[in-house]
Amino acid sequence: MAQKKIIIIGAGLAGLSAGCYAQMNSYQSQIFEHHTVPGGVAACWKREGYFIDGGIHFLMGYKPESSTYRLYQELGAVQNIHIVEMTTYFRYIDEEFQRTVEITNDLDRLAEDLKSFSPDDAKAIDELISGAQALRKTGMSTMRMDSPPPELLGTFGRLKQMWEMRRFLKYFSGKYAQAASDYAKTFKDPWLRKLIENLFLKDSSLPQKQS
């Protein structure tokens, strides 16, 4: 019996993972990549004397209790490495306004820092932080990342997935789907407006807790 074969387009993280799982399941896999090195957006390369590091520098779902961690284990991505928990996600430095703020996992601290820059925006800041806290409680960051693709779910599988996502679906529709560029206009302080626009994609929705 001839061995089953798969051709994969792109040697990014998804393509490389697909190749690994194909071979784990007795498929012969061949990956085609237009770049000179594999890795996609996680690749690093040298060009004209410069070292370009376009890679990601953090792992989502890296804790052992996460379903994503099992995928990392199967792919050999976490064995014999030390993962440092990241507590500071962004450091926003604005030379024009001479202000610096750190975005950490301490949302209460972030609220205090933002209010110290603009007391007049206290209410809007509280709404922003409340929305972030509400989204955190939904458990979106720990949702299953190893479920089958939509094409293979079937009716029951899709219903099950919708049920698992029920806690945070509302944050991406209706009143919560306001674009970040529009939401930024609700702040009085021009620096805060600039901060919001730089923290999020201008056209992305910005979940917020509203009464």
Image: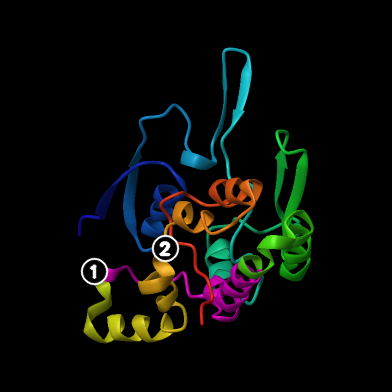
Residue under pointer 2: 178
Residue under pointer 1: 151
**Local SS, label 1:** helix
**Local SS, label 2:** loop
Q: What secondary structure prevails in the magenta region?
A: helix
Between 180 and 23, the one lying in front of the other is: 180
Q: CA distance from mark 2 to mark 1?
A: 30 Å
Range shown magenta: 126-151
User: For residue 144: magenta?
Assistant: yes
Between 204 and 195, the one lying in front of the other is: 195
Between 39 and 177, the one lying in front of the other is: 177
Would residue 86 be seen by someone viewing this image from the given angle? no
Residue drawn at point x = 35 percent, y = 73 percent: 174
Would residue 89 be seen by someone viewing this image from the given angle? yes
Q: Indicate which disc residue 102 carries.
A: none
Residue drawn at point x = 29 percent, y = 80 percent: 158
Q: Is residue 128 left or right of residue 145?
A: right
User: For residue 90: magenta?
Assistant: no
- Tell me which amino acid carries mark 1: Glu
Q: First in sequence, mark 2 or 1: give its number.
A: 1
